[in-house]
Image: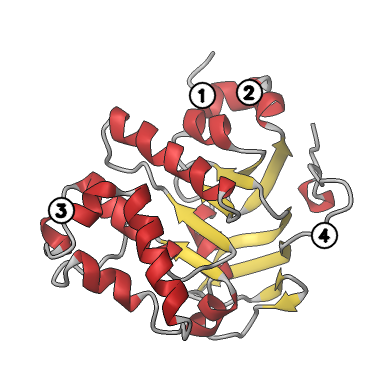
Amino acid sequence: MDTNPALAAGRPAGKDPILAVRDLHVAYGSIKALRGISFEVYPGQIVTLIGANGAGKSTTLRAISGIVPVASGDIVLEGRSLVRVPPDRITGLGIAHVPEGRGIFGNLTVQENLKLATFLRRDRDEIAKDYERVFALFPRLKERQKQLAGTLSGGEQQMLAVARALMTRGRVMLLDEPSMGLSPILVEEIFEVIKTIRAGGTTVLLVEQNAHMALKVADYCYVLETGTLAMSGTPAELQGDQRVKKAYLGVA
């Protein structure tokens, strides 16, 4: 197992990373949330970040999407630095962010939430195809197009959040705690959707408290502890590590 995440193991042969985080530091005032983390995500992968609450997982995604400022280090999407690029421009460059808590607009309908995600796009014909795509992926949303998003169930709201991200046509999707608050059946359904999204050509960076499910779908994994990357490896490697078993998988 690679215990030096800065070296970014799990590198597919002959591929350059689609997303690279390099010596990233983020602070909230005097609190150092991220302290020099480095990792890479390759096209077509599901890469997961696991760790305890407060480890810096959500902060990492927010830094990538430009929501929180970077103190130092770099974030590179297909060779282009995202540091100091405005969040709306980062979305236009290909990053789709599904935040923790979903972030949908409860006073708008399902259809209106989806339409908002297309405001940067000019390819009207392709937008129509993407509506068909997300409704095929989430038939319940098609049935509830005219329903206010705030009246949907928790699972349906999570589906809407993912569908809205897909409507941006981002090449990389950042998923922050997609299983939070969902029943076990819906958790299984959401993770099947994540695999389908990857199969459709979208690269996924997943933050997930449910380490069992995260390791089940991931190609490569990183473990964050108090703002640093403590270890990394394939799912099989981490599942066999005694520290991971004890801290995250509930196995003594």
Residue type of the residue flagged with mark 1? Leu
Badge nearest the viewer, 4 or 1: 4
User: Which secondary structure, mark 1?
Assistant: loop
Residue type of the residue flagged with mark 4? Asp
| Residue corresponding to mark 2 | 239
CA gap, disc 2 to disc 3? 36 Å
CA gap, disc 1 to disc 2? 8 Å
- Residue occupying image coordinates x 55% and y 21%: 246
Q: Are marks 2 and 3 in contact (CB under 8 Å)?
A: no
Q: Is residue 100 visible to us here?
A: no
- Is the image coloured rainbow, by chain, by secondary structure, or in one colour? secondary structure
Q: Between disc 1 and disc 2, whose residue precedes?
A: 2
Q: Between disc 1 and disc 3, whose residue precedes?
A: 3
- Mark 3 Cα-neighbour bin, 10 Å: few <14, some 14–19, many ≥20: some
Locate residue 131, reporting x and y percent.
35, 64
Residue 74: which numbered mark, if any?
none
Residue 16: which numbered mark, if any?
4
CA gap, disc 3 to disc 4? 40 Å
User: Which secondary structure, mark 4?
Assistant: loop
Q: Is residue 196 above or below residue 141?
A: above
In the rendered structure, the answer to whether residue 35 lies left or right of residue 133 reads right
User: On the rendered image, what quadrant is the N terminus found in?
Assistant: top right
Badge nearest the viewer, 4 or 2: 4
Q: Between disc 4 and disc 1, whose residue precedes?
A: 4
- Mark 4 Cα-neighbour bin, 10 Å: few <14, some 14–19, many ≥20: some
Residue type of the residue flagged with mark 3? Leu
Badge nearest the viewer, 1 or 3: 3
In the rendered structure, the answer to whether residue 131 lies left or right of residue 210 reads left
